[in-house]
Image (cartoon, coloured by chain):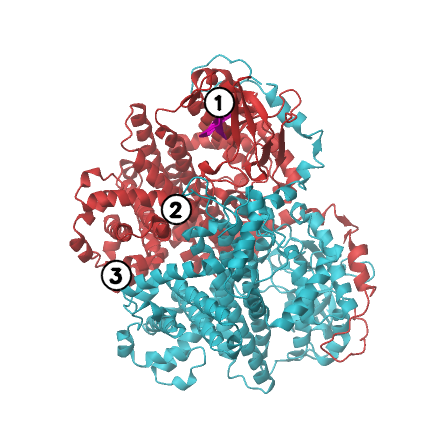
Chain colours: A cyan, B red
């Protein structure tokens, strides 16, 4: 039973405490599951405390700053972040935790995430010896300049040229049109001293295609851009406004020939171009970024879930059954449960998926080191698809969680909109989410063709299920085995449905392609196939995790909750796409109804654990920076504390009156703006003044 | 054929011109359709020109302003707006056009949209004589104070009390707890002089429930809040930051008894409370706001469609087929067509729906004037459902259109994010979108029960289709009549599918409710039922429109395009929810495939008309305020013109270097932040400085 306080404001703290005490499992166990183990979690806590206790990282004024103010503060945070790294000798992964906790999208991100990695992978050993230490020490700050105003993901469309001047042994970099100006380049606008510029090499009139070059762009003496380069910040964006995404135009700008990154392709003193032996190794880096984005999807969604689960517990709303009762908690409404609990489940499911991807990625790296490229295509395909799928559901999920909180969710103080706006382009960068699905679908099509021919040995761990397509007649007759509610609580049975549905859609894509439909006309089907494959993979990863040894170490109550939560994920996801499952008769209308009923049953059993499941994400208050989702539950008091800091309530006031009163409001009240004759009505006499 | 320019930047203007010339119908015809006729459109253009040519409404600095700057500018616009109204003697509907064109969410909105209408509907004639003219002349500025921090849509949960002091003949208004402070009240934070406050009347210890009171809150002399009232702005929100949503707490604040709005309920000098005779008439106002929100849904979505259709025409991206060719236009990609053309269709479909609602609303008002409440429940039900459905699809659609534009869509200069952020709460206010669906479902359930019993005469124009439920066995055996592609081009055939699907879901809800499932446990099903009913209604309104006389006046090419566009809407919407149609076997797998194929065929035939269909919305450049979607197509040049205005590129620069360089960047480059030892690597010697 909830304890009852005399005041709705006091009640909030009590409600959150009660919810915690009702949780059926030890919350800390899931904290360790989510953060990768007890030791990792303890280290993370220490790293986050470095941010919490450092005034440079204070975010109490966050929601009131103009872009300019916030940008300059961001630069100061950037400097401090490097100092902290150096003081404590933090590793790369430590730094990324500190960085995450400091919660600002800083101009160093692309230096660390693209500039250094590209030098490491594309520069020769001699070049690395020259540049790498300075980059790591931030004595030079770099960016990665590939995208142009007119050209994004299509590398062959880039217009920037680097023409070899053999006389001086230099590249002459040039932007022939405005459309060829580099654009969106993070870190470029105001900060970077160097850029890796991707330009098309022109040697003796021949175009050798796009290659990366190491280009100094600002003086290390006074930070002024060098003559021959025009640089600007590209202006305000939906979010990420502490990043100085930049614009750069070259006017016959010269750099030494040796500044071309020459690990693979090379150009000699006399202008001879040597092709790289093979370029498949470049895949590794892209895959890594996608693994990170899937990991990130579960982290950003976890944050919204934690805020929402708490607020929906302390928010009471709706008719009471008996006069004198407290209003029900928002979480008591089925529709609210239906919206928020599956998002929590999604968060865990994506975490298990990213853990699995991490293992697969490490395995790939070990193979590649030995020259074994056998798993490369598979990893490339599922990392493309999962990046697309997980960033889409995470971004949509955050916004759903915010909307679920009703009116107050729209306040910046809810803590969600600011970081949501910055996370938003996850859907677009590192491969636009719809485009990426074509890569996944193309691979699946290849695998399905092999399977249909009986070459099941070419199937991989993730496409194994396409083996079913070997016998089309049998496949068409398959029906789902689930006949009772308890069947729906077996991941294997759920996976059966996901595998059939994905295989069927791949088969239909194959049939369409085989019948001569052009690949370009199958883009919508590609997206559908990739989506289905990725949902299969997530349920597959859930199964892998629940069968793993680490689950056996959890207490029985945690195991049971996690198991039900993952069944909820699988069934709720199925419910949303039910058409795909029933269309060929694999799932019957009765089974569909049974699945829906089971979703509602699971919501009911998980309801008392909602706060526990969300609080297991364990983000500290300073990071959530949310009036609605703080650990003490005092949402209304915190909302009011926050609004008292609003500049319009402070410095903009004179004697309690807004400063533009005289200019804008007084002339109205005093009738100095003329008199209105309403054309819709006969003119009417002016009434007396209002009674005060 | 596209004309080919030598420069991708020049090409953009040519591409847009070519697209216009390819349009198969006279664009202006659809402009008149969308804006309600030629005369209305011409008046609208004149009204918009008042905004365009007035410096007070300039928006060129829009995307760079801090909240404080923009707020004060907004107040100035507000004053100017009233001046313009008075100068030109504009009608209420004229003013709303000017206001829409000025594109700022101003503190006068709730004065016009809630304060005045509530006085008109709830104040007695004597009270109106006292207050109304001052309100219309803005000599008093009002707001509507109902929502509290702790209490939203559940009126009975409100805590603010108004206790009658019979001795002084006054109400004593009080906020007993922080949770009872009024919150989110538009216009209150800094501007309003008066508020309609909703408080629970307390007379002689008896609670008479929530009633509206006319409350002076700031002095008309100096604008200071009166003693006994604390007012603040509630701080930054996702959007709508020129609105001063406010917080207000009362400390035993006194107003005359006569300030209670006494058109219906009354309290006499001796404290006798008289109940209103009937309160159903209050529905009228709510319904009107919902009609407006559906109308608004089509307007805000049209704006995003216009920007996106232009940009996707001038944006070229993707591999070329023959070297030397131009890259394809973004709109040439099927996936892009699949994302944007149905949104344009949706915009028109919602416009036809809101026109129909408008007629029905006027009919209702005429009936109510004669005391006829027979259509009230029907109008209430569909206006609730359509508000929920249309605001949801519009808000999601705007964001889809933005994402469809790829990276540049994320720039504020794209013109979408700013107004999207302000439109976002359409989903939440005037009835939270999920809650509203329960009202629609409850009504449908009642109608279905009557139909099942054979009482089909109680069915209304919108629930007629539930008559099918009279014979459950026949109904279960129904199958869709579509057997050829051309069947899918008949709205009647499409409506058949929508009506069966909606009826089936209503029947399932009825069966569940009849079998004893609690109403609270059916919230998810209510949402599903309301969604299905509203999609039926939209297709119904499409049919009504296409059969109407006004269509006959259009040229054949316009009629043909509109017809195909509306079939696309109906089939694409069906495709997205296909599970609902196939689950009970009404639509077969073959028919589902045929519908999907037809969607792709329709996209292909509509492709050349995409720009024409979107440009028919005809919003002027100054209103779109979009670098990507301007009428001259010069997206890249305009992006660069915009970014040159970014403060970080202007006033924040010293000598071409950002002002925090010395503090934040220089210490890094000069190595003044200590040296990093990477714990992951054996210590390595420092390399030489980078070669410049």
- Mark 2 = which residue? B389
Q: Is residue A183 left or right of residue B14?
A: right
In the drawing, what numbered circle is on residue B260?
A: 1
Q: Is residue A590 magenta?
A: no
In the rendered image, residues at marks 2 and 3 fall on the same chain: yes
Rendering coords of residue B346 (x, y %):
38, 48
| Disc on res. A613 | none
Residue at point 76%, 60% (across, down): A79
Label located before the other in sequence (2 or 1):
1
- Which residue is more in the foreground, A450 or B685? B685
Quadrant location of the C terminus of chain A? top right
How many residues crowd around disc 3 within 10 Å: few (fewer than 14), some, or many (20 or more)? some
**Residues marked 3 and 1 touching at CB (< 8 Å):** no
Question: CB of mark 2 within 8 Å of CB of mark 3?
Answer: no
Answer with left or right where residue A137 lies relative to residue A413.
right
Magenta range is B199-213
- Label 3 resides on the chain identified as B
Q: Mark 3 points at which residue?
A: B591
Disc 3, SS = helix
| Camera-side residue of A188 and A490 | A490
Q: Distance between the residues labelled 3 and 1?
A: 61 Å
Q: Check disc 2 and report its element: helix, strand or loop.
A: helix
In this picture, residue B384 sits left or right of residue B240: left
Is label 1 in a helix, a strand or a loop? loop
**B587, B380: nearer the viewer:** B380
For the question of whether residue B322 can be seen, the reply is no
Labels 2, 1: one chain? yes
The first of marks 3 and 1 along the sequence is: 1
Crowd rating for badge 1 (residues with CA inside 10 Å; few <14, some 14–19, many 20+)? many
Occupied quadrant, residue B371: top left
């Amino acid at each position: 039973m909830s304890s009852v306080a005399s005041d709705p404001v006091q009640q909030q703290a009590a409600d959150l405490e009660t919810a915690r005490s009702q949780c059926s499992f030890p919350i800390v166990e899931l904290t360790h599951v989510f953060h990768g183990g007890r030791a990792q979690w303890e280290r993370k806590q220490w790293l986050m405390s470095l941010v919490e206790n450092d005034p440079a990282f204070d975010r109490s004024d966050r929601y009131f700053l103009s872009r300019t103010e916030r940008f300059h503060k961001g630069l100061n945070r950037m400097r401090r972040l490097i100092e902290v790294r150096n003081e404590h000798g933090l590793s790369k992964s430590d730094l990324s935790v500190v960085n995450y906790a400091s919660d600002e999208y800083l101009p160093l991100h692309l230096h660390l995430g693209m500039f250094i990695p590209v030098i490491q992978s594309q520069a020769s050993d001699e070049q690395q010896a020259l540049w790498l230490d300075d980059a790591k020490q931030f004595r030079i700050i770099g960016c990665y300049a590939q995208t142009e105003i007119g050209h994004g993901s299509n590398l062959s469309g880039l217009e920037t040229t680097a023409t070899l001047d053999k006389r001086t042994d230099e590249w002459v970099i040039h932007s022939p049109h405005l459309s060829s100006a580099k654009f969106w380049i993070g870190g470029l606008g105001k900060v970077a001293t160097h850029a890796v510029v991707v330009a098309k090499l022109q040697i003796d009139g021949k175009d050798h295609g796009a290659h990366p070059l190491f280009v100094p762009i600002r003086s290390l003496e006074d930070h002024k851009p060098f003559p021959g380069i025009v640089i600007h910040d590209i202006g305000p964006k939906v979010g990420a406004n502490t990043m100085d995404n930049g614009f750069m135009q070259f006017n016959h700008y010269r750099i030494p020939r040796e500044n071309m990154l020459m690990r693979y392709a090379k150009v000699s003193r006399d202008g001879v171009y040597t092709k790289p032996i093979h370029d498949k190794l470049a895949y590794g880096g892209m895959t890594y970024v996608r693994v990170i984005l899937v990991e990130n999807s579960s982290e950003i969604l976890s944050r919204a879930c934690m805020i929402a689960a708490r607020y929906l517990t302390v928010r009471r709303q709706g008719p009471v059954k008996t006069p004198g009762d407290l209003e029900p908690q928002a979480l008591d409404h089925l529709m609210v449960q239906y919206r928020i609990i599956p998002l929590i489940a999604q968060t865990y499911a994506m975490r298990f998926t990213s853990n699995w991807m991490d293992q697969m990625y490490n395995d790939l790296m070990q193979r590649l080191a030995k020259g074994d490229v056998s798993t490369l295509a598979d990893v490339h395909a599922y990392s493309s698809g999962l990046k697309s799928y997980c960033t889409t559901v995470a971004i949509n999920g955050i916004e759903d969680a915010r909307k679920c909180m009703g009116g107050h969710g729209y306040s910046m103080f809810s803590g969600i909109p600011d970081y949501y706006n910055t996370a938003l382009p996850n859907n677009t960068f590192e491969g636009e989410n719809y485009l990426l699905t074509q890569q996944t679908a193309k691979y699946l099509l290849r695998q399905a063709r092999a399977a249909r021919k009986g070459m099941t040995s070419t199937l991989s761990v993730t496409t194994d299920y396409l083996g079913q397509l070997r016998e089309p007649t049998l496949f068409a007759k398959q029906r789902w085995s689930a006949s009772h509610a308890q069947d729906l609580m077996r991941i294997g049975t759920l996976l059966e449905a996901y595998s059939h549905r994905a295989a069927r859609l791949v088969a239909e894509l194959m049939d369409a392609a085989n019948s001569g439909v052009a690949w370009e006309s199958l883009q919508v089907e590609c997206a559908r196939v990739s989506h289905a494959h990725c949902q299969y993979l997530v349920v597959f990863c859930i199964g892998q995790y629940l069968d793993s040894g680490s689950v056996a170490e959890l207490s029985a109550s945690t195991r049971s909750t996690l198991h039900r939560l993952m069944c909820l994920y699988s069934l709720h996801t199925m419910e949303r796409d039910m058409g795909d499952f029933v269309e060929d008769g694999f799932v019957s209308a009765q089974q569909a109804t049974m699945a829906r009923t089971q979703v509602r049953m699971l919501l009911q059993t998980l309801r008392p654990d909602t706060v526990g499941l969300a609080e297991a994400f364990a983000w500290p208050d300073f990071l959530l920076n949310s009036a609605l989702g703080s650990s003490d539950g005092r949402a209304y008091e915190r909302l009011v504390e926050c609004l008292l800091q609003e500049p319009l309530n402070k410095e903009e006031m004179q004697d309690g009156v807004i400063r533009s009163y005289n200019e804008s409001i007084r002339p109205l009240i005093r009738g100095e703006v003329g008199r209105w004759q309403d054309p819709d009505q006969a003119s009417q006499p002016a009434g007396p003044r209002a009674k005060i």
